[in-house]
Image (cartoon, coloured by chain):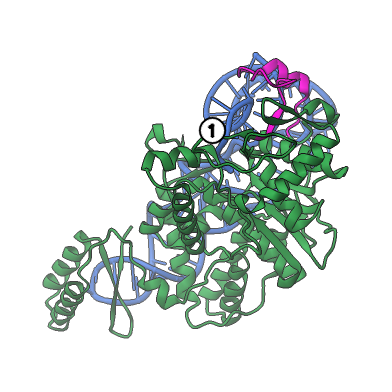
Chain colours: A green, B blue
Amino acid sequence: MVLKLYDTLTRPAKPQPFRPIDPKNVRMYVCGPTVYDFAHIGNARPVIVFDVLFRLLRHLYGPEHVTYVRNITDVDDKINARAAERGIPIRQLTEETYANFNADVAALGCLPPTVEPRATEHIVEMKTLIERLVTNEFAYVAEDHVLFNVKKMPDYGRLSKRSLDEMIAGARVEVAPYKRDSTDFVLWKPSKPGEPAWPSPAGIATPGRPGWHIECSAMAWKHLGETFDIHGGGIDLVFPHHENEIAQSRCVFHTPVMANYWMHNGFLQVEGEKMAKSEGNFITTRELLAEWPGEVLRLNMLRTHYRQPIDWTEAGMRESKRTLDHWYELTDDVAPGYLCADMHDAVSDDLNTPKALAALHELRSEAGKGSKGAAAGLKASAHLIGLLQMTTRQWAAWRPKSLAIDKAHVECLIEARNAARKAKNFKEADRIRDELKAMGIELEDKPDGTTIWKVRR
RNA sequence: GGCCACGUGGCGGAGUGGUUACGCAACGGUCUGCAAAACCGUGUACCCCGGUUCAAUUCCGGGCGUGGCCUCCA
């Protein structure tokens, strides 16, 4: 089956066949993190989803024929505020946060993007775009700001399906006095002393810094060109961020589109509630990674189609863990075999990972009945979406950080129990089993006489 | 207030104008000193109200519910 993708811009009834501009260089841009704090589990969703797409594109077009750009936003008012709050230099905050982000996404089994550009290293490109927008009268200077004049773009609002009239009517925010129209957005703004600042474009004397949207237009242009294939991100970015990116890029380059496929992942809730610091259910990826292997998070994310809303629950994590336990057990010492066609077709159908997982369950079932080919297929097929990347031994050895288990003590108890079993003192053997169970440890007596243990969740 | 999504069995979650999704849990069985794991087998569904149709969970309209955006939040 050919790859089909759903495009937010055209909103087709069904996902449409993907046709790259250049099959020798398939180009994808995904909005990356603003580096001011640990990534939460909602931030992890697009990272995982688009990693699956990246892997699939590499599979279809060849690893050297796919360029995946995921930016790092390291200039932003939230960053300034947080650095001030913590009393550390901005650069220290962004470097530290970036390092944490990198460690987290690696633990989630995500491949590094081809390019990870930083906003602060693309100020020149941003200024070039801004100058051109001013020259072409899509943007204007007012009180040391450069603003994009939305009225100059007739089809502004197409991505988010909003008309200018609606936006003006529904506006709830006080309009800055220097804006010509309430919907105009900032390309460049003046910096106060102490804020990050660069020499301003468009003849503005006061040093300033870029607005939020222009960085993505600049970095996409620099690394992917004027138009490219896929642009992705969370659904909350549709408006205003992506709408404004489109406006900037298309008006600068006079192109009918910025990207041919706009892909947006759905939102995430936690235990049926929206995730918010005020709700007290704000979960960072880092916290979860202390309690679960990264692949459990990854599988848990992929059990729901990327465009659907997802409810993140502890119960779901347990189920995902259990599934992987089983898969790992069946693929011990198995070399990857053939990619299952159902798997390939499901992932190719707008990343239908839940359906793909059903294909893996099918292989699991066959492998459980003793089929070596199915076990090899299970491994190869799981690899396509970045699962089963550890050895079974590594998987079995994984322990949550919070679990302070005295391994030697456990082994000692198991030995005592086996001695009791040998002496047919089953009462004592069961007492030890219960003792370990109370510690959260479950025993499994293997047919060959050995006993293994695992942590119950 | 405006715009946009989503609502499937106990739970998670695909899909479809008429035919078993799948997984977890549950229950029964095999195995086991007892368990666990594994394997075999079994059950329950499409938010509400209209409409279109021979036929709707699937299409259309309305309602209710949940969520997102309209405030530089994935």
- Residue A442 in view: yes
**Front position in the image: A168 or A432:** A168
Residue drawn at x 30%, y 64% as measured from the top left = A455
Give above or below for A362 relative to A228. Answer: below
Inspect the image, locate mark 1, and give the three-letter code of the amino acid beneath it. Lys
**Front position in the image: B37 or A207:** A207
Residue at far front of view: A205
Q: Secondary structure at mark 1?
A: loop
Q: Numbered disc 1: what chain? A: A
Taking the image as shown, residue B32 lies to the left or right of residue A418, namely: right
Q: Give the residue at mark 1.
A: A192
Q: Where are the magenta residues, as a range?
A: A160-188
Q: Position of residue A80 (x, y in %)?
A: 48, 40
**Quarter of the image where one finds residue A82:** top left
Give above or below for A156 relative to A369. Answer: above
Q: Position of residue B51 (x, y in %)?
A: 79, 21
Residue at far bottom of view: A448
Q: Is residue A41 magenta?
A: no
| Magenta segment, prevailing SS (helix, strand or loop) | loop
The quadrant the N terminus of chain A occupies is bottom right
Taking the image as shown, residue A88 lies to the left or right of residue B41, namely: left
- Residue A11 in view: no
Give above or below for A6 relative to A366. Answer: above
Q: Is residue A164 magenta?
A: yes
Q: Position of residue A201 (x, y in %)?
A: 72, 39
**Front position in the image: A18 or A278:** A278
Q: Position of residue A38 (x, y in %)?
A: 44, 49
**Quarter of the image where one finds residue A340:** bottom right
